[in-house]
Amino acid sequence: MLRAHEWTWEDATHVDELREVVPDVVVNAYTEPWVNWLRAEARGAFDEIHMYEFLEHTGHQGDYPEWFLFWEQVWHALKPGGMVFATAPYGLSRGAMGDPGHTRFLVEDSFWFLDPCQYKFNEMKRTTMTQYLIGFHLCNKVVLAAPTKKDGPVEHLFVVLEAKK
């Protein structure tokens, strides 16, 4: 997590569950303290949040209230216009399915539900999109949600979100 646009990695607040990597904040992605830390300590503190190979360890597939609560806390932690940069194993790729610690499987569509503009777009096209944002206070713009691959099958997902406040 980063505090300023003019930054070095020394300026970052490193959050991890492994004490061995000497993070600034120790939290476990599988438990409530991660959300509690964001709620209590980080309100409006960050220009950027970087989450690399993290999201697949949060929550449980199909638990949409937990998914949106997590993103609501991330949104609150960002300054207006703050950005999220994230990577995760792609959907049902070997990397996603092979790790017994992965509890959520993500594709680019997983992030469109965080962007209110997508709901309006789907209404105009008269297509269905379950309205999950009711009751949650967040507004993100999906800047990019795209699978990445070199040779062979898609293995990773790269995501960029912008907090609209």
Image (tube, rainbow, N blue to C red):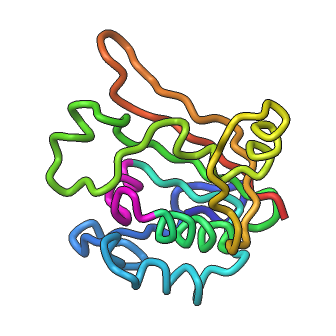
Q: Is residue 108 above or below residue 138?
A: above
Left or right: 74, with 60 as reference point: right
Foreground residue among 148 and 14: 148
At a point 36% along the width and 78% down the height, the residue shown is 27
Foreground residue among 117 and 25: 117
Residue 54 image position (x, y, % from top left): 38, 55
Q: Residues in magenta?
A: 53-63
Looking at the rendering, which quadrant does residue 8 occupy?
A: bottom right
Residue 16 image position (x, y, % from top left): 35, 68
At a point 72% along the width and 50% down the height, the residue shown is 115
Q: Is residue 116 visible?
A: yes
Foreground residue among 83 and 11: 83
Looking at the rendering, which quadrant does residue 164 occupy?
A: bottom right
Q: Is residue 81 above or below residue 41?
A: above
Left or right: 115, with 9 as reference point: right
Query: Is 125 inside the magenta-drawn segment?
Result: no
Looking at the rendering, which quadrant does residue 11 occupy?
A: bottom right
Q: Is residue 5 visible?
A: no
For the C terminus, give its image quadrant. bottom right
At a point 28% along the width and 57% down the height, the residue shown is 103
Query: Is 62 inside the magenta-drawn segment?
Result: yes
Residue 17 image position (x, y, % from top left): 29, 72
At a point 45% along the width and 34% down the height, the residue shown is 157
Q: Is residue 49 above or below residue 161?
A: below
